[in-house]
């Protein structure tokens, strides 16, 4: 019977396309790789590779095998990452996967509050628009917009992130505010590129202003925020980012309001682990408490600019 080690050699050749490259990836000799692949084909009595002058190409049987070999590789990596958690470490580590926008504009501040009551937990945020594979234990908790993406994860749709149209106060004073979506064709629109070009709010805006004036584009929402701040145009932005921003004006909130599901997820095997569970429960409470912010419904009077160092806040409760 074949072992995972046999499939490991097969997978290396399938990914690398040659014996020499596979040998380097596995830190073994080239003859060893060739011998293991030959033995695997002999035992299976199936040809997995076509040997060509340009390298090794998968046969139909090899392509079918590749699917299962990659699944085995993911499970093996997940097992290793899971076991690594039990190594002796000075602090319990909880890794949270989310987007840069959520991490930068909301999560970091919330985790600072969490640390005051959980000083023994070491927190690590892993950001990126690409979903971190929590089922492989590269992260313990995921805060995701859109679809959850993995039925091996435990969690729930914790709320929604609403997205609206925003411009700077200076842009409105210079160009006026559009009164309908059709009016956007007479305004400068900030477009989205790269990894964010197919986000729901982006595709809706692009359909609305197919003939509009697009003078600026970016592949990062933070850069788009900077462009709005500088008066370059109107952008579709998450409300939790744009609403608290000074001098940002929301445009047509009744006609352009795009909701995106927000999911809080955890690996099923870790959901009852002490530090992971405490972090998950804390985030669930914090997201629920900030529902109005994520929904774009937080009243303006609550979006107060925080005093800078050396300033005195005007909002002081209590006696004189």
Image (cartoon, rainbow, N blue to C red):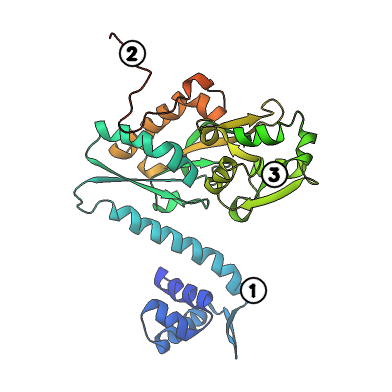
- Residue 60's disc is 1
Which residue is more in the foreground, 178 or 255?
178
- Tell me which label, 3 or 1, sits earlier in the chain: 1
Task: List the residue tagged with mark 3.
Answer: 189
Gap between marks 3 and 1 measured at Cα: 49 Å
Residue at image point 35% right, 22% down: 313
| Residue sitting nearer the eye, 43 or 197 | 197
Q: Residue at x 36, y 82 (%)?
A: 28
Query: Dot 3 surroundings within 10 Å: few (below 14), some, or many (20 or more)?
Result: many
Which secondary structure, mark 1? Answer: helix
Separation of marks 2 and 1 at Cα, in angstroms: 72 Å
Query: Looking at the picture, how far across and down is residue 49, in whole percent?
Result: 57, 81
Q: Is residue 47 visible?
A: no
Element type at mark 3: strand
Lower position in the chain sequence, tag 3 or tag 2: 3
Marks 1 and 3: in contact by CB < 8 Å?
no
Image check: 81 left or right of 294?
A: left
Q: Residues within 10 Å of mark 2 (few under 14, many from 20)?
A: few
The mark closer to the camera, 3 or 1, is: 3
Observer-nearest of 45 and 295 = 295
Left or right, 117 with reference to 287: left
Number of labels in the image equals 3
Q: Earlier in the sequence, mark 2 or mark 1?
A: 1
- Could you tell me residue 18's position as x and y percent? 51, 83
- Residue at the far bottom in the pictured view: 53
Residue 67 at least partly seen: yes
Query: Residue 317 has which mark?
Result: 2
Q: Nearer the viewer, residue 172 or 318?
A: 172
Mark 3 → mark 2, Cα distance in angstroms: 42 Å
């Amino acid at each position: 019977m074949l072992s995972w080690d046999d499939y490991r050699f097969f997978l290396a050749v399938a990914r690398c396309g040659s014996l020499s490259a596979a040998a380097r990836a596995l830190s073994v000799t080239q003859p060893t790789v060739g011998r293991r692949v030959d033995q695997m084909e002999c035992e299976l009595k199936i040809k997995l590779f076509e040997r060509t002058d340009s390298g090794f190409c998968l046969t139909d049987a090899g392509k079918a095998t590749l699917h299962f070999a990659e699944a085995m590789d993911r499970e093996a990596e997940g097992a290793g990452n899971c076991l690594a958690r039990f190594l002796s470490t000075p602090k319990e580590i909880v890794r949270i996967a989310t987007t840069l926008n959520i991490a930068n504009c909301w999560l970091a501040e919330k985790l600072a509050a969490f640390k005051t009551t959980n000083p023994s937990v070491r927190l690590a945020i892993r950001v990126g628009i690409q979903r971190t594979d929590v089922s492989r234990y590269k992260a313990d908790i995921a805060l995701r917009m859109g679809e959850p993406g993995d039925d091996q994860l435990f969690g729930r749709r914790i709320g929604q992130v609403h997205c609206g149209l925003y411009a700077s106060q200076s842009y409105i004073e210079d160009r006026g505010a559009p009164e309908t979506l059709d009016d956007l064709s007479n305004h400068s629109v900030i477009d989205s590129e790269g990894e964010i070009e197919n986000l729901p709010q982006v595709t809706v805006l692009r359909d609305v202003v197919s003939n509009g004036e697009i003078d600026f584009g970016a592949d990062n929402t933070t850069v788009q925020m900077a462009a709005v701040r500088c008066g370059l145009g109107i952008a579709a932005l998450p409300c939790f980012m744009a609403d608290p921003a000074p001098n940002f004006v929301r445009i047509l909130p009744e006609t352009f309001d795009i909701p995106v599901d927000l999911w809080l997820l955890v690996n099923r095997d870790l959901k009852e682990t002490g530090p992971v569970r405490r972090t998950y429960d804390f985030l669930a409470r914090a997201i629920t408490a900030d529902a109005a912010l994520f929904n774009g419904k937080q009243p303006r009077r609550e979006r107060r600019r925080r005093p800078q160092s050396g300033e005195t806040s005007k909002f002081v409760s209590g006696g004189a």
